[in-house]
Protein backbone atom coordinates (compact mmCIF):
# COMPACT_ATOMS: atom_id res chain seq x y z
CA UNK A 1 0.00 0.00 0.00
CA UNK A 2 3.01 2.27 -0.14
CA UNK A 3 2.33 5.35 -2.21
CA UNK A 4 5.09 7.15 -4.08
CA UNK A 5 5.94 10.62 -2.88
CA UNK A 6 5.15 11.99 -6.34
CA UNK A 7 1.56 10.83 -5.97
CA UNK A 8 1.26 12.83 -2.75
CA UNK A 9 2.46 15.97 -4.50
CA UNK A 10 -0.23 15.66 -7.18
CA UNK A 11 -3.07 15.82 -4.67
CA UNK A 12 -4.94 19.04 -3.99
CA UNK A 13 -5.01 20.36 -0.43
CA UNK A 14 -8.52 18.95 0.10
CA UNK A 15 -7.47 15.57 -1.31
CA UNK A 16 -4.42 15.50 0.97
CA UNK A 17 -6.54 16.24 4.03
CA UNK A 18 -9.05 13.54 3.06
CA UNK A 19 -6.25 11.02 2.48
CA UNK A 20 -4.71 11.84 5.86
CA UNK A 21 -8.09 11.24 7.56
CA UNK A 22 -8.44 7.89 5.79
CA UNK A 23 -4.93 6.88 6.80
CA UNK A 24 -5.48 7.97 10.41
CA UNK A 25 -8.59 5.80 10.61
CA UNK A 26 -6.65 2.87 9.18
CA UNK A 27 -3.78 3.47 11.62
CA UNK A 28 -6.16 3.54 14.60
CA UNK A 29 -7.88 0.37 13.42
CA UNK A 30 -4.54 -1.42 13.19
CA UNK A 31 -3.56 -0.22 16.65
CA UNK A 32 -6.92 -1.28 18.09
CA UNK A 33 -6.43 -4.72 16.54
CA UNK A 34 -2.91 -4.90 18.03
CA UNK A 35 -1.31 -4.75 14.58
CA UNK A 36 1.38 -2.33 15.67
CA UNK A 37 3.76 -2.83 12.75
CA UNK A 38 0.96 -2.06 10.29
CA UNK A 39 -0.06 0.96 12.39
CA UNK A 40 3.53 2.23 12.31
CA UNK A 41 3.72 1.76 8.53
CA UNK A 42 0.55 3.82 8.06
CA UNK A 43 1.86 6.44 10.52
CA UNK A 44 4.93 6.78 8.32
CA UNK A 45 2.71 7.24 5.25
CA UNK A 46 0.87 10.02 7.07
CA UNK A 47 4.18 11.68 7.92
CA UNK A 48 5.33 11.53 4.28
CA UNK A 49 2.04 12.96 3.08
CA UNK A 50 2.24 15.85 5.54
CA UNK A 51 5.85 16.56 4.54
CA UNK A 52 4.91 16.58 0.85
CA UNK A 53 2.17 19.10 1.62
CA UNK A 54 4.67 21.60 2.98
Image (cartoon, rainbow, N blue to C red):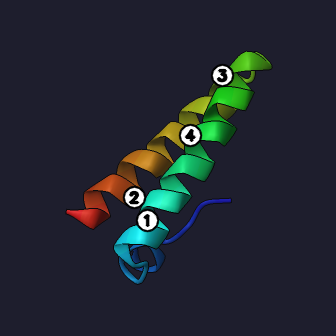
Q: Tag 3 or tag 4, which sits nearer the N-term?
A: 4
Q: Which mark is residue 16?
A: 1
Q: Tag 3 or tag 1, which sits nearer the N-term?
A: 1
Return the residue found at the far right.
Answer: 33
Nearer the observer: mark 1 or 3; the answer is 1
Return the residue found at the far left.
Answer: 54
Q: CA distance from mark 4 to mark 2?
A: 12 Å
Residue 1 rendering spot, x and y as whole percentages: 68, 59
**Residue at 48% across, 71% down:** 15
Q: Tag 2 or tag 1, which sits nearer the N-term?
A: 1
On the image, numbered disc 4 is attached to which residue?
Answer: 24
User: CB under 8 Å between callouts 1 and 3?
Assistant: no
The local secondary structure at tag 4 comes to helix
Q: Is residue 49 above or below residue 36?
A: below
Residue 45 rendering spot, x and y as whole percentages: 49, 50
Q: Quadrant of the C terminus?
A: bottom left
User: CB under 8 Å between callouts 1 and 2?
Assistant: yes
Q: Which mark is residue 36?
A: 3
Q: CA distance from mark 3 to mark 2?
A: 20 Å
Residue 6 falls left or right of residue 21: left
**Residue at 41% across, 83% down:** 10
Q: CA distance from mark 1 to mark 2?
A: 7 Å
User: CB under 8 Å between callouts 3 and 2?
Assistant: no
Q: CA distance from mark 4 to mark 1?
A: 12 Å
Q: Tag 2 or tag 4, which sits nearer the N-term?
A: 4
Q: Is residue 27 above or below residue 53?
A: above
On the image, numbered disc 2 is attached to which residue?
Answer: 49
Nearer the observer: mark 4 or 3; the answer is 4
Q: CA distance from mark 4 to mark 3?
A: 13 Å
Amino acid sequence: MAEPELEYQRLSQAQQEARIKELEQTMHRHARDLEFEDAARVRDQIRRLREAAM
